Amino acid sequence: GPSEFPSSLPSIIPSNKPSTGPSEPEPEPEPVVSITTGDQFNYGPWGGDCMAFFAAGVLGMNGDESGKTWKCEDVADTKKLLNGETVMVEWGNSGNSGKYYKPMTATDNDTFKVMHGSTAYYFKRVQSTLPTQL
């Protein structure tokens, strides 16, 4: 008749080792940076005040005084940038003909780092402070 040996070990053995391979699709990662149109940033080389904007899902920033601007190439690059990856942003300084690009990285929720050659410059979020009435 059938053997009476106990069945072998269960096929699914809980393991406390981290999983090594992708077993199922990763959920879309939460953005490192939360940003909306109208958020204010400070960028010294453009005289300070800059405002973030989204145009059809593409992130950019305008310098309030300078009239200068940067923006991501597309929605995919916007997502990458907000997830902490470095992307090439279109750097539209006045006086430059044609497009040219600078590598940009979000280093945290309040900081975008842009590289000019080997020098880093930073767009720093301006915390909105409501005036306090005394």
Image (tube, grey):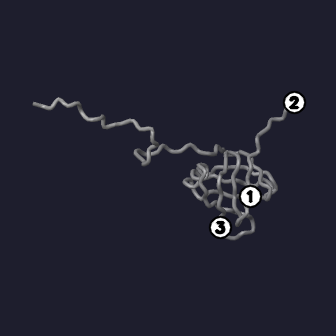
- Tell me if mark 3 has few (under 14), some (14-19) or many (20+) residues whose alpha carbon lies within 10 angstroms of its own: few
Asked where in the image residue 104 lies, by quadrant, the reply is bottom right
Which of marks 3 and 1 precedes in the sequence? 3
Which residue is found at the position 34% from the left and 37% from the top? Answer: 12
- Is residue 20 toward the left or the right of residue 103 in the image? left
Which element is circle 3 on? loop
x%, y% of residue 60? 66, 54
Residue 99: give its label: 3
Which of marks 2 and 1 precedes in the sequence? 1
- Is residue 28 toward the left or the right of residue 130 in the image? left
**Label 1 with label 2: CB-CB less than 8 Å:** no
Q: Which residue is mark 2?
A: 133
Which element is circle 2 on? loop
Q: Residue furthest left?
A: 1
Count of numbered marks: 3
Which residue is found at the position 80% from the left and 56% from the top? Answer: 44
Which residue is found at the position 64% from the left and 43% from the top? Answer: 34
Q: Which residue is mark 1?
A: 121
Residue 101: give its label: none
